[in-house]
Every structure is written in structure tokens, then in C-alpha cells.
Amino acid sequence: MYVKPGQGRSTNAEGRTAIAGGEIGADRVSIFESDQNGNWVRVKLLLPPDPSPSFNFLFSVALEGDRLAVGAPDRAGSVYVFERHHGGTNAWGLVQELRVSGAAADQWGVGTDLSGDTLTAWNAANNEGATSAYGFERNASGVWK
């Protein structure tokens, strides 16, 4: 897979799927899949659900199976959860926006991790070196809490 210079500020891969957080200055996430010949093809381009200046939609990505978490720390601390077949086959539709409030929201979404039905996201260290992490569980209805 070829990733242009400046693209792939945040990347993740699992099996035949790879994610590249967009080009620096362009808030988008590319989803690639390998074909039967081993060639990587972009199958989806995700754009911010609510674009705004300095959005940083691409800052962190976490992929597990058919789920993708995208951190957007400049969006008042948001993490967006997408699922491969939400809205149709290979649609990679937005399932939920996760947010925290208060001081912890500052730069929240700098890091993301997915493991089964657990999502963890954290913020950047402040001037004192402190950071905050929040965990979310996906319930039987598919809602992250």
C-alpha cells in the first residue's frame, strides 16, 4: 500500500483492512482493503460528520474487526465510532459520537484503543504531566456507555 507523504498521521491495520488518518491539514480518514492479488485499494473515504476549522478528525484511529474509532481532540474532545456495515454493506457508517466534559475534554481523543466491546480514549498530558483516560462499553443494544 502506498501512502502519500503527509498522509497516515495515524494508522492501524487488521487482516485485510488498513486505516490511514488523512493528510495533514485535510480532515479525512481513508479505509483500504487488500484484494485477492494483495493490492491495497481505498474503499472508503470518511469525512468529519460535523466539519469545523481545526477539527483534527484524523488524530487517532483504532480498528478492531468491523469497528473503527476515530479521535478528534480539537472537537471539544470527541471520539467517533464507525461500523463497517452500518447503513449498508461496507458503508462504514457513523454509529455514535462519544464525548467527555470538563477539563478532561481538553485534547481528549488524542489516543484511542478498541478491544472487543471496550473502547478506551485518552487526552494529551497537561502542563503538570497528567492525563485522563475514559473507558466505554458497548451494551447489547449497540450503544457505547
Image: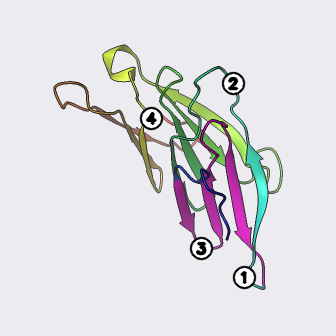
Distance (Cα) linking label 2 and label 1:
34 Å
Read off the residue under disc 1.
38
Q: Is residue 15 left or right of residue 117?
A: right
Label 4 is placed on what type of residue?
Gly
> In the image, what residue occupies the spot 59% across and 73% down?
15
Q: Secondary structure at mark 2?
A: loop
Disc with the residue nearer the chain's start (3 vs 1): 3
Marks 2, 3: nearer the viewer = 2
Q: Is residue 58 left or right of residue 52?
A: left
Distance (Cα) linking label 4 and label 3:
24 Å
Residue 20 on the magenta span: yes
Distance (Cα) linking label 4 and label 2:
16 Å
Read off the residue under disc 3.
15
Q: Quadrant of residue 127?
A: top left
> How far across and down, in percent of the image, does residue 56 sit?
56, 32
Residue extent of the magenta highlight: 11-36
Distance (Cα) linking label 2 and label 3:
30 Å
Distance (Cα) linking label 3 and label 1:
12 Å
> How far across and down, in percent of the image, does residue 123 sit?
35, 33
Residue 118 on the magenta span: no
Distance (Cα) linking label 1 and label 4:
32 Å
Read off the residue under disc 4.
109
Q: Is residue 5 left or right of residue 116?
A: right
Read off the residue under disc 2.
51
> How far across and down, in percent of the image, does residue 136 sit?
42, 38
> How far across and down, in percent of the image, does residue 81 sit?
59, 41
Classify 10 Å Cα crowding around label 4: few (below 14), some (14-19), many (20 and above).
Answer: many
Disc with the residue nearer the chain's start (2 vs 1): 1
> In the image, what residue occupies the spot 67% across and 71% down?
1
